[in-house]
Structure formats: structure tokens, C-alpha cells
Amino acid sequence: MSEEIEWWEYETADELAEAIVGDIGFVIESALDARGQALLALPGGKSPVKALELLAKQKFDWKRITIIPTDDRLVALDDPLSNVAMLAKIFLPKGARVMPIASGAAADHKAAGKAADARLQDLHWPPDLVWLGVGTDGHTASILPGPDLADALEAPKARRAVGVLPDPMPKEAPAARVTLTKAAILSARVITLSLSGKEKRKVVERAIKDGALSQYPIGRVLADAEQAIDIHWSEE
Ligand SMILES: O=C1O[C@H](COP(=O)(O)O)[C@@H](O)[C@H](O)[C@H]1O
């Protein structure tokens, strides 16, 4: 378990966005100073959009920044469920390199996972930042219950992405996925988590308490983290 998990609490999503963007700004500047480039793995879904839009307004040398989604749904690139399309809309106009980890809809999620892994092997690893979201079902990235859960949680260090067929299918985005593995997430220089609402907070608190034995994927991931982790939570 991470030495230090620190909760940061805000009343509103705007306050959360400002705070997390401040923290990420520091990570980006440090990476650009130290290595001349930055690799960021950013969350999909709906709740981080406000903070991502605020991040895109910051003045960085965006051309030196590569962005990948922490996970994606195997849907067409013009589908509203596509995480990379959401990230591309926000960050491509800034000049950042936004790299898909999936090639759109795919019939074979395992093959899509292997292809995602191959793409990620070409990147300058590890990521400077993995920013995670969490679902009310306790999934993080697309590490979801189902037949591929162990692939995502127990993949060897070298394996960066796998395909996942969720069971049950999450109602808000019923699609097969590709996701960073737990090992890839934990390889990041900095890991941060953001969430809002009392329901998700309860899930994450329970997950942290149960640690490696947690029924929730987020608990299994955090249990093996060695980094200090900031959790940004807003009430609304
Ligand atoms: O399906 C997904 O869900 C999680 C949580 O999304 P949220 O909108 O409820 O915060 C997200 O982090 C992940 O990237 C996404 O693919």
C-alpha cells in the first residue's frame, strides 16, 4: 500500500478542477525541465472534462507533451463514448500529441489489447502522470470485473495494456475496452485520482480499507502503489 494517500476535499467541481490542474501543471513543468518532454495518461468518462478543459488553457509547450487515455472503449472514433476523441478535441488544438491506444471498434478485444500494448511500447516510458478516475462500481481506467480482470491486475511489469470484456457491462458505456494494466499505472512517476459525490467516496474509502483483498479494482491498484497518492474529491 502507498505510504501516503492524501484526500483533498472541495465543495465544487470548479474548485477541484483548479486544484488538480495546479498539481498537474507542476508535474508537466518538472518533466519538461528534466527530460524535455512529458507523457500524460489521462482519464476518460465524463467527470474529468471540466478539469481537462482547464488544463488545456494553461500555457505549456504543448508540442512536447504526449497524451494517451488511461483506457478506451472499443467504439468508432466518432462515437461519443470514445475517450481518445474527447481528449483529442480538447488537446489537439493546443498542439499536443494525442495518441489513441485503440483503433476504434474491434471485434476481438484481446487482439485490441495486444495492439494497444505494442503502441505503448514505442513511447518514452514511464508516464510522468497517470490520472485516474473511478466508477461507482469501483473500476478504474477500464479495469473492470469480468473474465479479463486478472489479465489487467496481474500482468507482468512489461505489459502495458490489455483488452477487457466487462461482465457485467457498465450501463453508462457498454463496450469492450482496452486499458493500462495495473503494472503500467503503478509505473507512473505520479499517480493522482479524482472523483466526485458521496457514493464514489464511500467506494474508494472501502476499497482503501480492504486493500489487496478489495472487491473493487481501484482498491487492488492502490494497494500496490509505492508512490504517495493524492485523491481529489468534490462533493458535487
Ligand atoms: O468508463 C470509464 O469510467 C471511468 C470513470 O468515469 P467517470 O465519468 O464516472 O469519472 C473513467 O475514469 C474511465 O476512463 C472510463 O473509460
Image (cartoon, rainbow, N blue to C red):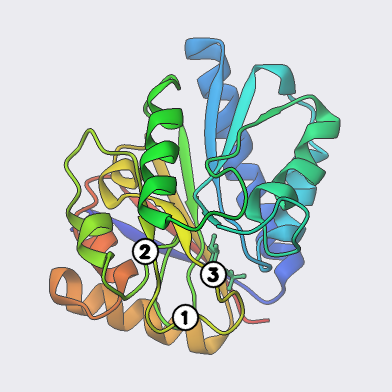
Marked residue nearer the N-terminal end (2 or 1): 2
Q: CA distance from mark 2 to mark 1?
A: 12 Å
| Three-letter amino acid code of the residue under disc 1 | Met
| Three-letter amino acid code of the residue under disc 3 | Ala
Query: In the drawing, does residue 48 fall left or right of residue 180?
Result: right
Task: Look at the image and tell me in which quarter the C terminus lies.
Answer: bottom right
Residue drawn at (45%, 53%) of the image: 178
Image location (x, y in percent) of residue 185: 35, 46
Image location (x, y in percent) of residue 152: 28, 56
Give the residue pinned by disc 3.
Answer: 175
Give the quarter the ligand 1 occupies: bottom right
Asked if disc 1 and disc 3 are in contact, CB closer than 8 Å, the reply is: yes
| Three-letter amino acid code of the residue under disc 2 | Ile
Give the residue pinned by disc 1.
Answer: 169
Q: Locate residue 49: give its quadrant.
A: bottom right
Crowdedness near tag 2: few (<14), some (14–19) or many (≥20) residues, C-alpha within 10 Å: many
Whether residue 184 is situated above or below residue 211 in the rendered picture: above
Give the residue pinned by disc 2.
Answer: 143
Marked residue nearer the N-terminal end (2 or 3): 2
Residue drawn at (22%, 46%) of the image: 226
| Nearer the observer, 70 or 81 | 81
Q: CA distance from mark 2 to mark 3?
A: 13 Å
